[in-house]
Amino acid sequence: MLILIGLGLGDHTDITLKGLERVKKADKVYLDEYTSRFEDSARDLENFYGKKVIRATRDILESERLVEEAKKERVALLVVGDALSATTHIDLLMQAKKENIEVEVIHNASILTAIGTTGLQLYKFGKTTSIPFWKENYKPENFYEVLQQNKSIGAHTLMLLDITPERCMTINEAIELLLKTEEKRKEKIFDKTTLCIGCARIGSADQKIKAGTAEELMKEDFGEPLHCLIVPGELHFVEEEAITFLR
């Protein structure tokens, strides 16, 4: 059996009662360390659950290891946020179903819902996009195109920032890439005066949310990851009022 369990966005106490029950009954427990980062370490979780937690890297998650083990054992995969936060988790789900393995999904809060804490209305968000680190021969601009599409219909844009084994992208770096792309394309989609909302560690006790112009947020220290960036579209008067509390 394969069990995908959402951990929520804060620490080990955010797991649901059902999720905790499944962890305790599992033969093997993995923590996804590829698609996101968790406030608590695998060791912290081991202490809380009272059982071993295996750190699941990209290689493990993209191999057939979990599915093969799930044929004979109860295998739990702990996922930061919701249990189906990324394509990786959908792929695992489908692999297991193709092998006729019993699957259970236990949901939890994700960044896609927690951004409601900004005061922006969730149904007014358009397509979510990601901003990856640029490399010498790899400088994608899809995030700029998504922003353009969302702005054309007045929708808000949530931008998830890149995560690598070495480091996590900051809000400041994301804004810098947006400005560089605007400088190159000159389509008047984003500039230093664009209203932005920077969100750091949403769901944690020390979350930080700040609204301001791109230029203002570039100077802000948002602290430890994870970060995300929101570029609001057309604002309802209630949203406008909510944002005043974030400045």
Image (spheres, rainbow, N blue to C red):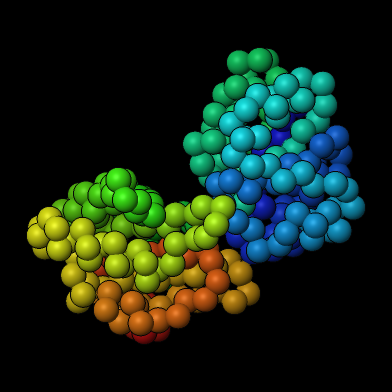
Residue 196 in percent (x, y) is at 31, 71
Compare residues 123 and 215 and report the one nearer the observer.
215
Name the outermost residue toward the front: 136
Q: Is residue 97 above or below residue 191?
A: above
154 is higher (above) or lower (below) than 67: below
Query: Is 54 left, or right, of 114 in this rendering?
Result: right
Q: Quadrant of the N terminus?
A: top right
Taking the spot 86% from the left edge, 39% from the top edge, the residue there is 25
* Residue depicted at x 90% and y 52%: 50
What residue do we see at 31% from left, 46% from top? 138
Question: How many labels, in total?
Answer: 0
Viewer-side residue, 58 vs 102: 58
Instruction: Please say whether residue 108 is visible from this viewpoint.
Output: no
Question: Whole-percent x and y of residue 188?
Answer: 11, 63
Would residue 204 be found to the left or right of residue 68 on screen?
A: left
Q: Is residue 207 visible?
A: yes
Q: Quadrant of the C terminus?
A: bottom left
The answer to which quarter of the image holds residue 216 is bottom left
Q: Quadrant of residue 12?
A: bottom right
> Is 231 positioned to the left or the right of 167 in the image?
left
x and y, in percent, of residue 17 in the image: 77, 52
Residue at (54% x, 29% y) in the render: 91
Residue 231 at what x, y percent from top left? 29, 64
Determine whether, in the image, residue 219 is placed left or right of residue 145.
right
Q: Residue furthest right?
A: 50
